[in-house]
Image (cartoon, grey):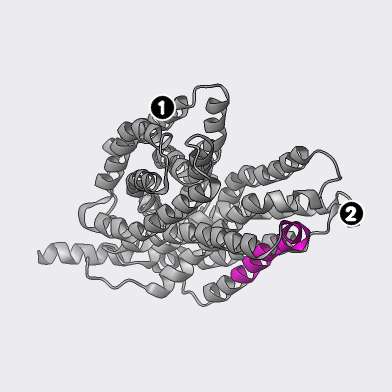
């Protein structure tokens, strides 16, 4: 089975939307310092940033709703339809921000446009993860699913790197005044255009065999909460196995640059370069780890991540807080990201393999979105809370504790690598077993 061909068109079409999603997510937060003054009256600059940050937070609250609505849509209307819808929402949200009128022109109406854009973006992100994970898993032959689905995090990381790269280019080619006046609109125009390209690519995708089979044989109860409740154990499993992984992921990606700058005292430029280089190598590791899981199973990688994160976070983050240059910061950051790779490279395929076809997208989407909002989305705030209270190391123990809970799940869950996702796979598996 390991020699089965990888359907690269499906892999690219199914995963590339994540790149646009995470690009949009990154550029909103990183360019907020430039566009905050455009949507609120003259006054306290901090208040403007807080208002912009509050609008950013709206997106996190919408992710569980997006997971439910678009997960249900993917189970009822098809994976291809859901992928097309999520990328449409992406393009619309980026375009709205790009053309949003300023406070000087229309008062608070511009801020309202931002809110609507973030609502759409939150819905899109909530549904994209599950639609992508489900499509990549179902569209790939058993024996290559771990490798193919790992490209979900390749594309997610690529989106952050593209956003970071564009930020560096604009900061070095435009004045701060120009960026604050009109330059901040450029990355959102790029995001809208990129989403339009992804829409074109996804229109030519084929529906998965597993979904087509399910639609023919069982047209009722697909994508409903009632159907999901018949798999409560698996839904709780998704929340628990996501808990430790998402906290660790946000710690070593989103929070890392701020930590290296604020706590370790590295110049912001150095901290940014460390993050960029570490993320690039991390991105390249995903297919290697995903392919390894196709050979040895999913559980060994998850268990390795759980043990490494539980035991390694405190000493690793403590050491990162004392680095004094690029080299030390990069090496230690990479150690953390190598550990996290045990989760990120296969978490999508594991979740998809837990559920039957009729509720697979919703089963991945809703529990994941809840766990991500509760633990991933709050990781940076929890870290800053501990720092503000003078017990920064408390956050390291918090990350370790979340990993410990997830480790218990990894140790007790069933292996999912050889699960048949369609009747055809099941028949082929039985045929192989009979010949052996």
- Quarter of the image for residue 86 reads bottom right
Q: Quadrant of the C terminus?
A: bottom left
Spatial separation of the CA atoms under disc 1 and disc 2: 47 Å
**Image point (77%, 41%), residue name:** 45
Q: Is residue 296 magenta?
A: no
Q: Residue at x 43, y 71 (%)?
A: 10
Res. 104 mark? 2
**Depth check: 214 or 235 in front?**
235
Q: Residue at x 48, y 74 (%)?
A: 205
Q: Is residue 75 visible?
A: no
Where residue 400 sits: x, y (%)? 38, 31
Which element carries disc 2, helix, strand or loop?
Answer: helix
Residue pointed to by mark 1: 397
Residue 119 x, y percent position in the rendering = 69, 51
Q: Is residue 429 above or below residue 339?
A: below
The spot of residue 408 in percent (x, y) is 31, 32
**In the visual, does 189 lie left or right of 138?**
right
Q: Identify the magenta region.
A: 176-195
- Pick the front one: 59 or 41: 41
């Amino acid at each position: 089975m390991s020699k089965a061909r990888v359907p690269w068109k499906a892999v690219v079409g199914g995963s590339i939307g994540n790149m646009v999603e995470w690009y949009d997510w990154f550029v909103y937060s990183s360019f907020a310092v430039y566009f905050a003054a455009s949507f609120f009256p003259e006054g306290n600059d901090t208040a403007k940033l807080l208002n912009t940050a509050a609008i950013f937070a709206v997106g996190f609250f919408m992710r569980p709703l997006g997971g439910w609505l678009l997960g249900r849509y993917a189970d009822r209307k098809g994976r291809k339809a859901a992928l097309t819808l999520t990328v449409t929402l992406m393009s619309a949200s980026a375009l709205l921000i790009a053309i949003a009128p300023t406070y000087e022109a229309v008062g608070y109406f511009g801020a309202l446009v931002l809110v609507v854009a973030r609502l759409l973006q939150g819905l899109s992100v909530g549904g994209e993860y599950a639609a992508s994970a489900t499509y990549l898993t179902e569209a790939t032959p058993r024996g290559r699913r771990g490798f193919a689905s790992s490209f979900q995090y390749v594309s997610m990381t690529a989106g952050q790197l593209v956003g970071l790269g564009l930020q560096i280019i604009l900061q070095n080619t435009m004045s701060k005044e120009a960026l604050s006046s009109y330059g901040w609109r450029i990355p959102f125009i790029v995001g809208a255009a990129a989403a339009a390209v992804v829409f074109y690519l996804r229109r030519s995708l084929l529906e998965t065999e597993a979904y087509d089979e399910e639609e023919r044989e069982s047209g009722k109860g697909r994508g409903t909460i009632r159907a999901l409740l018949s798999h409560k154990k698996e839904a709780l499993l998704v929340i628990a196995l996501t808990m430790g992984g998402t906290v660790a992921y946000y710690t070593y990606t989103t929070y890392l640059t701020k930590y290296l700058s604020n706590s370790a005292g590295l110049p912001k430029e150095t901290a940014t370069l460390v993050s960029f280089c570490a993320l690039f190598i991390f991105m390249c590791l995903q297919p290697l780890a995903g392919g390894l899981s196709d050979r040895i199973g999913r559980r060994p990688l998850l268990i390795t991540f759980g043990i490494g994160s539980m035991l390694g976070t405190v000493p690793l983050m403590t050491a990162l807080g004392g680095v004094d240059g690029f080299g030390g910061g990069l090496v230690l950051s990479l150690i953390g990201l190598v550990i996290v790779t045990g989760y990120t490279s296969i978490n999508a395929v594991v979740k998809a393999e837990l559920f039957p076809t009729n509720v697979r997208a919703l089963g991945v989407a809703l529990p994941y979105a809840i766990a991500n909002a509760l633990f991933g989305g709050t990781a940076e705030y929890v870290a800053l809370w501990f720092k503000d209270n003078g017990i920064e190391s408390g956050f390291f123990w918090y990350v370790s504790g979340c990993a410990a809970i997830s480790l218990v799940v990894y140790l007790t869950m069933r292996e999912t690598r050889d699960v048949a996702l369609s009747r055809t796979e099941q028949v082929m598996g039985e045929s192989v077993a009979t010949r052996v």
